[in-house]
Image (spheres, rainbow, N blue to C red):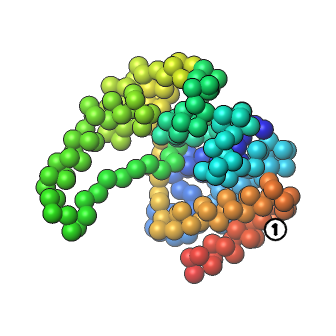
Amino acid sequence: AWIDSVGSLFSIMIGQEKERYYDASGKLIYANNPAVKTAWDTSVQAAESGLSAKLDQWSPQWNQAFAAGSFATIPCPAWMLSYIKGQAGDAGSGKWDIAKLPGGAGNWGGSYLSVPRAAKHKKEAYELIEWLTAPEQQAKLFQKQGLFPSATGAIEKISGAKDPYFSDAPIGQIFGDAAKSSPVQVLGVHDANVNQQITNALSEVERKGTSSDKAWSTAKKGVDNVIG
């Protein structure tokens, strides 16, 4: 198969958009957003063309597929590099490479650090977060784990980074250029819920051959039920 699932294709395409499910005023716009329709239609076409391995991301079968070579490509963020290494193992070294995404750069989540309100040592915890997120530490984490830095000051520090596991791909340049051109996204309260309902419906298309119109109707009903 060419890709792991059409759900991942949809998610990466919609992650390249400034507005996807909500607009800047907080209005839900996914149903009439041309960008969502384009991503949906492209994903449906991929499913109907038999390009998908039909694997749920994070499932045991999906994990095994990295080592088995069940799909040729996977659209993914920088932080997934270490995950791919872990699943494909030493035998996968040199068999993977990295390229820029068609359509430009985007965002597919990340990690956040916070201090609980009930913490006994808030000041010290905050100082630790400051240290962890400083450019120097983030540059080291990218070199070792592929965790792209959130500190803009670290981008130049990792610009020359390459990864021998991924055929010496210039990951510093590729992901650095992506970060510079990535849009500032509008994220709504129920962004994750909307995305989940849409990708669930796309799964019906790729696995059961459900028509695009019927699956889209299912997605909209799912959104309505979850959001209320």
Look at label 1 and name its amino acid: Lys
Q: List x then y, in percent, for residue 4.
A: 70, 43
Q: List x then y, in percent, for residue 43.
A: 74, 50
Disc 1, SS: helix
218 left or right of 152?
right
Residue 60's place in the image compared with 73, above or below, is: below
Q: How dense is the environment of label 1, judged by Cα within 10 Å: few (below 14), some, or many (20 and up)?
A: few
Residue 156's place in the image compared with 9, above or below, is: above
Q: State the residue position of label 1.
A: 214
Residue 135's place in the image compared with 166, above or below, is: below
Q: Quadrant of residue 153?
A: top left
Q: Nearer the viewer, residue 122 or 159?
A: 122
Q: Which of 137 and 23 is in front in this view?
A: 137
Quadrant of image for the N terminus: top right
Quadrant of image for the C terminus: bottom right
Residue 57's place in the image compared with 180, above or below, is: below
96 left or right of 105?
right
Q: List x then y, in percent, for residue 8.
A: 65, 48
Q: In the image, what residue occupies the spot 66% across and 34% down?
A: 67
Q: In the image, what residue occupies the spot 54% across and 33% down?
A: 85
